[in-house]
Amino acid sequence: MRFFIYQQIKIVYATVLLLFVLSCANNEQKKNMLPSGGPYRTILIAQAQFVYENKDGKKLPKPGPALLVIKQKTADGWKDTVLEDPQSNVFHKALILPKDASRQILTIGAMQAALKLWEFKERSWQQTVLWQPEFGGKWNRLRDVEIGDVTGDGKPELVIATHDQGVVAVVRQAGRNWQVEEIDREPETFVHEVELGDVDGDGLKEIFVTPSRPNKAKGGPQPGKIVMYTWNGTGFSKKVVDESDKTHAKEILVHDIDGKGVATLFAVFEAETIEGDTGITRKQPVKIKKYFYNKESFTSEIIATLDDFQCRFLTPGDVDGDGQVELIASAMKTGIWLLKKQDGSWKRSLIDADSSGYEHATCVADLDENGTAEIYVASDDQKELRTYVWNGTTFSKTVISRIPDNRITWSITTGLF
């Protein structure tokens, strides 16, 4: 009798365990399933995630698979779909391909520096590797990508910046094939960002990038440049726009601020620091510069400073509905700032001091198409994905969702998907 009861208990236990495993599997499958219908207003959140392991009595973080959270606004509210890539340990950026009927997403990653297309079909994610280079240095990262016509052929190209061999590459689609051209390479160099825009008014977008010496965790001088590449009919001509031997710009912006068909270059130079016995000391603040282009040369002026160490996102948009483009500067520690052009100068005001993060990823977009752009922010320190919306007198904050404490958000992009 006891044996019979024991056997029944084992059967019940096995059944419960099986149901639990199946439930977990179903939940995992649902997590990776796009909602039916659409296209929906979508936020792409490119992240690194970490798992923790105990070593010598210490809890140490270890990078997990690259993570992309696809957040879609359906009739039932925000729905999340998760895309993971175990071949990389971070997605630095993800983009919804424009005018694409097959619902594809482009991603760049590290340390397996992979440019991939992802398509959701047959109830799962299918990937196509477009480019997976090895640069030969210590790091192997695709750091930034932008889409635009930089050769004047009427077709959009991809322009990619890399760590750590200073590669700038243009990727063209030729039928079903993708052709990669390295237009620059410099050893022991990190290229942090790509921006595209027509600053000379000739109808062709120029390429701007921000190379520097490799990142330094302990502070001190990290020289860097801003470089422009211009299509000359057969290749790309290179010009140094600005440079510093004490600091560098990671964040730049190229945008048609005045709506006149000519773009303006902005750059955020990180604080000048020195390493001392008591830690890192800030010698100069973060400086935001505006550049003026005239007959192949650039001049600049400082339009704002921030008492912070860095500001990795400077994003444009009409966020108060007045028909004028403002700039949103998301600093590492001091919050989210509004830069508004008034009477020939730029006025700085604080939107929210209680928002921060190492990257502090930010996107400005009019997803609800009401004529006024919303501000989407990954407040990693506060573990919240937020939106800020102008209510006529101030910016109202709404928490869209929580951000787990094992994540770093590298970029936020939006679109219909």
Image (cartoon, rainbow, N blue to C red):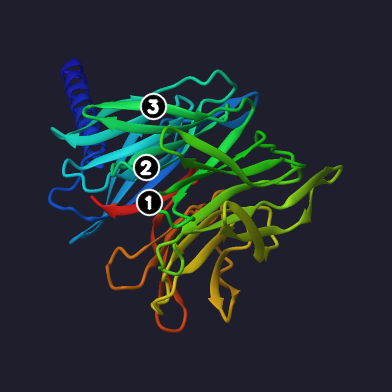
Q: Residue at the location (53% across, 73% down)?
A: 340
Residue 94, disc: 2
**Residue 93 picture location, percent across and down:** 42, 42
Local SS, label 3: strand
Residue 83 visible in the displayed image: yes
| Left or right of residue 74: residue 260 | right
| Left or right of residue 387: residue 218 | right
- Nearer the viewer's eye, disc 3 or disc 2? 3
Q: Earlier in the sequence, mark 1 or mark 2?
A: 2
Q: Residue at the location (46% across, 66% down)?
A: 257
Local SS, label 1: strand
Q: Dot 3: within a 10 Å radius of its alpha carbon, few (fewer than 14), some, or many (20 or more) residues?
A: some
Q: Earlier in the sequence, mark 3 or mark 2?
A: 2
Residue 413, disc: 1
Q: Nearer the viewer, residue 377 or 107?
A: 107
Q: Nearer the viewer, residue 399 or 314?
A: 314
Amino acid marked by disc 2: Ala
Residue at the spot of label 3 = 180
Local SS, label 2: strand
Quarter of the image for residue 191 reads top right
Residue 289, disc: none
**From mark 3 to mark 2, how far is it between C-alphas?**
19 Å
Q: Nearer the viewer, residue 215 or 68?
A: 215
Residue 404 visible in the displayed image: no
Amino acid marked by disc 1: Thr
Quarter of the image for residue 8 reads top left
Amino acid marked by disc 3: Val
